[in-house]
Amino acid sequence: MTDLELKQAALLVRKGIIEGVHSAKAGHPGGSLSAAELFTYLYFEEMNIDPRNPKDPDRDRFVLSKGHTAPGLYSTLANRGYFPVEDLLTLRHTGSYLQGHPDMKHIPGVDMSSGSLGQGLSAAAGMALAGKLNKKDYRVYVLCGDGEIEEGQIWEAAMFSGFRKLDNLCVIVDNNNLQIDGPIDQVCSPYPIDKKFESFHFHVINIDGNDFGEIRSAFEEAKQTKDKPTAIIAHTLKGKDISFMENSVDWHGKAPNDEEYEIAMEDLRKVGEALCQK
């Protein structure tokens, strides 16, 4: 896909995030929106996947370690063809398979149930090691939050991954600098994130995580890296493309009301119009 096509896909992902969270009257829009380009590139360009065969043993794997940003993953899966886009409106509703955190037992395309922060990298490392032991060619991708990596288990898994030289593992850190209690450097700073991963024997790449050109280059570099796992530190904007949500910690975990929903959808309409001019 061209960068323009990817931007158009990311716009649909953002629309699905806003529609789902508004319908649920709950959820986590801020970190879902910041990672929209990352979700889009992974599922529309990077990963070896087939929505018609979501359990293909040779598929690439994805773990959403920051599981509360499930609205972003669900919108991406729906727009990629894993299930109907209309089902996004059932988010968090009683009886819906699209609950507040990813569930691998009931949601097509979800490779690992997650939500308890800090655990996703351990699961992804296990998948990557299994691939090595079974001489499989699949790659494993895991998206972590920058607040989430304050968890100690993240660094245990990083130590293991570096020691085992899991070059089929790619960690992406959504570095939007905000967690539920405020700026990460004021809560419990994980900075410098890149130097920390380097100390655990990772190949590290810093990028603008909302720029498809930089995302593309980073994933290509990761695939060419041997004998080391890769950590992509993706510097992003929380709440991106929604005027009143951008860089606001208030929108970590709440839903827009009807008036805010209309403003948000108008913001996205303007983004779409701008893309049409390109």
Image (cartoon, rainbow, N blue to C red):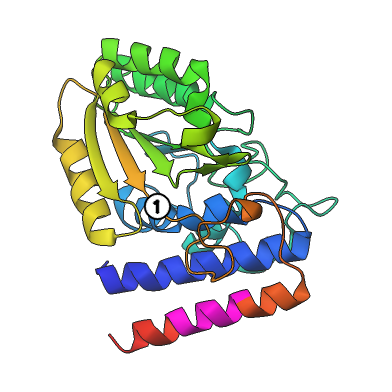
Residue at 46%, 21% (x, y): give it: 154
The segment highlighted magenta reads 264-271
Quarter of the image for the C terminus: give it.
bottom left
Q: Nearer the viewer, residue 207 or 186?
A: 186
Q: Secondary structure at mark 1?
A: loop
**Residue at 34% across / 67% down in the picture?**
6
Q: Position of residue 240 (x, y in %)?
A: 48, 63
Q: Is residue 43 left or right of residue 96?
A: left
Vertical placement of residue 146 versus 23, above or below: above
Do we see residue 64 in this rendering?
no
Give the residue at x 62% y 50%.
252
Residue 166: where, in percent of width, then height? 28, 20
Front-most of residues 8 and 50:
8
Q: Is residue 62 visible?
A: yes
Screen quadrant of the N terminus? bottom left
**Residue 2 image point, x, y percent:** 24, 69
Count of marks placed on residues: 1
Question: Relative to 79, is 262 above or below?
Answer: below
Q: Which of the 4 image quadrants contains residue 112?
A: top right
Bin the neighbour count of mark 1 within 10 Å (Cα to Cα): few under 14, some 14-19, many 20 and up: many
Question: Which residue position is annotated with label 1?
Answer: 236
